[in-house]
Image (cartoon, helix red, strand yellow):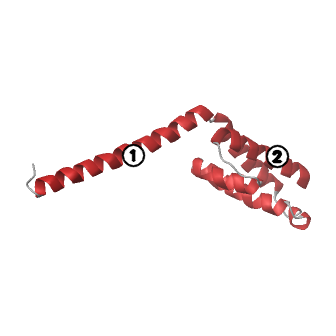
Amino acid sequence: MTPSDLQARLDGLAALAKTRLGVSGNETSSVLQLAGGDLPRRERLAARRLAEQAALAENPKLARRLDIEVIETDIKRVERHLRRIDPREAAANRWAGVLGSIAFRLLVVLILLGVVLVWQDLI
């Protein structure tokens, strides 16, 4: 695999991460780093390695030192996981998390308000 083939595969993986996870970024390495937060542990580590390798692949001298087999397995691992993600479901889960966080904080504030009102003998 030539460095240009590798860069094309990494660009395709970054485009897949953009569409499936909704991450933004201009460079392949930044997209893969941003996608890492939404990935399971093994896929996150693979994406981190790929982001580092993408930066090295841009330099022709350093590109010769890359381990293509490891990169291929990492690409396949991350790509397999990204293809299983439904973008609508991911967005719904993100909104559910935000709403759950807001509801929990509101509950804590109401409980603290009740404690203060009881403490001040207003109830």
Q: Nearer the viewer, residue 108 or 30?
A: 108
Residue placed at 91% from the left, 63% from the top?
60
Mark 1 Cα within 10 Å, few/some/many (few <14, many 20+)?
few
Q: Nearer the viewer, residue 29 or 2?
A: 29
Question: In the rendered image, which residue does mark 1 sit on?
Answer: 102
Q: Is residue 1 visible?
A: no
Image location (x, y in percent) of residue 69: 80, 52
Q: Position of residue 113 (x, y in %)?
A: 22, 52
Instruction: Tell me how far mark 1 sits from mark 2, CA to CA.
Output: 40 Å
Q: Amino acid at mark 2?
A: Arg
Tag on residue 2?
Answer: none
Q: Is residue 102 left or right of residue 107?
A: right
The amino acid beneath tag 1 is: Ile
Mark 1 or mark 2, earlier in chain: 2
Circle 2 sits on which residue? 9
Q: Nearer the viewer, residue 89 or 113?
A: 113
Q: Residue at x 89, y 63 (%)?
A: 64
Q: Residue at x 59, y 32 (%)?
A: 88
Query: In terms of secondary structure, where does tag 2 sit?
Result: helix
